[in-house]
Image (cartoon, rainbow, N blue to C red):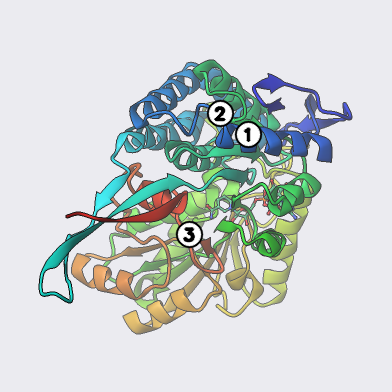
Amino acid sequence: MYIDGQWTDGAEGRRMVVVNPATEEEFATAAVGSAADCDRAIAAARRAFGSGPWPAMSRPERSEMLGRFAVELRARVDALAEAVTAETGAPSASVRAVHLLAPLGHLDHYVEQARQPDTTSLPLQVNPRPDGSSWLGGSVLVREPVGVVSAITAYNFPFHLKIAKLGPALACGNTVVLKPSPNTPLTAALMAEAAEAAGFPPGVVNVVNGGADVGALMCTDPRVDLVSFTGSEAVGAAVSAQAAPTIKRVLLELGGKSAMIVRADADLDAALAMGLGSVVTQSGQGCALTTRHLVHADIYDDYVAGLADRVRAIQVGDPTDPSTAMGPLISAVQREKVEGFIGDATAAGSRLVAGGGRPADLDKGFFVEPTVFADVDNSSRLAQEEVFGPVAAVMSFRDDDEAVALANDSNYGLGGAIFSADAGRAFEMARRIRTGQVHINGGSGASPGWDPFGGYKRSGLGRELGDAGIADYSEIKTIKYHAG
Ligand code: NAD
């Protein structure tokens, strides 16, 4: 762990094992934080914010330091790729592009953002005096850091999720206590190493390991100003409750059950490519994956058959093998949960068309076959709850209104997609879907740093990335003055 600019094994010297989900091997250990370590990290972040050099630095100086952080992270890309694959089972074929280089592009955006002016002048006002003369009144808006940020992350994209918090938080001049998922301490340690090498003043970036106990302290401590959380809906609700008594700002990036709508005029191959991606990407452990496939009745049978064929052709197995497309789930517990969904879906009358079991040739690792269910009822558990595994729920619709209604018939609202030859019609439908992002015909092809990301409804509160991310990690102060 990295606290107040120093490496520590923690006050109690406890350690946890890190398990490779593809081999079930306990391949590393990591320090576990205690209440005392959490206290020390929050105290360091508070001190660094209150009296350290960080908040007093000029914007170009802060930007330069963030730029050095990006350089140090890039210098560790090989080690980070190895750690992400070993900790999460992400296939090595895609780990660099998806897990590392895309978020590093987001960080570059924040290096630029950190330089941007933090004041905005409002229009001058002419104010009448009783004697008939007048005076000028002016005001400026000043963007300031919120203070100490508790950043708590999930396991599935361990590097990206931390960059999405560290980037905007540091660009605005906040200090951070970061707690990674207990499944992914190694990625976090490498990132702390890069922060140390970049030269952030002590206490600006702190990394404390631990589970719910440490996380809860990070939400309740009165010295913390903002809690930025990425994880499940249930823990997000707990985080909100924990933070409420001290009126902290809370940002929540939670789960999803996103819908992709495939209209009758869609390019079927393009839709199937995204449909397949939503099953196999990170073994289905992605918050914004479009796991509900809503397909027009006229092309429904072709879509179901096409998706089943593609899913069966996927190579599942050792994530370090460059030809592997899908690795394991994170843990035995997660696999059991996913298998529970598969059992329930079958019992609820959904039609299993591909997968549904464990790969016959893999006797170690938390693997589940990529699985497709057709004829899924949108009110069923499979369609309403987040599986966080490689399981597609396919259902049909007859017209655009029904498709939009089905897409919106969810407690979540994170991602979404529409495939149609009529881009204008797809755009109008996108406006009607209550969700944070909609990709038309596969989207823009990239995820640039200026795209905000976040959820409607129970998918969360606030936005990360983009300029919206800057707003969420800032306070706005109005300074009013006599201008003459
Ligand atoms: P989780 O909710 O189990 O854990 C997330 C983090 O919260 C972990 O670091 C955990 O130790 C910590 N935690 C647990 N109890 C806590 C408490 N009481 N107070 C504070 N912290 C506590 O989630 P997970 O299983 O690691 O990740 C999967 C979930 O994350 C899915 O629901 C997924 O959709 C969501 N997710 C969302 C996004 C997004 O951007 N919206 C991105 C990735 C993952």
**Which mark is in front, 3 or 1?**
1
| Residue at horizontal 39 percent and vertical 60 percent from the top | 437
The kind of residue tagged 2 is Gly
Q: Position of residue 1 (x, y in %)?
A: 72, 27
Residue at the spot of label 2: 52
State the residue position of label 1: 47
Q: Is residue 218 left or right of residue 64?
A: right
Q: Nearer the viewer, residue 51 or 183?
A: 51
Question: Which image quarter holds the C terminus?
Answer: bottom left
Q: Earlier in the sequence, mark 1 or mark 2?
A: 1
Residue 462 is marked as 3
Q: Earlier in the sequence, mark 3 or mark 2?
A: 2
Q: Secondary structure at mark 2?
A: loop
Q: Position of residue 6 (x, y in %)?
A: 69, 20
Q: Are marks 1 and 2 in contact (CB under 8 Å)?
A: yes
Q: Which mark is residue 202?
A: none
Relative to 134, does residue 1 appear above or below in the rendering?
above
Three-letter code, disc 3 = Gly
Image depth: mark 3 or mark 2 in front = 2
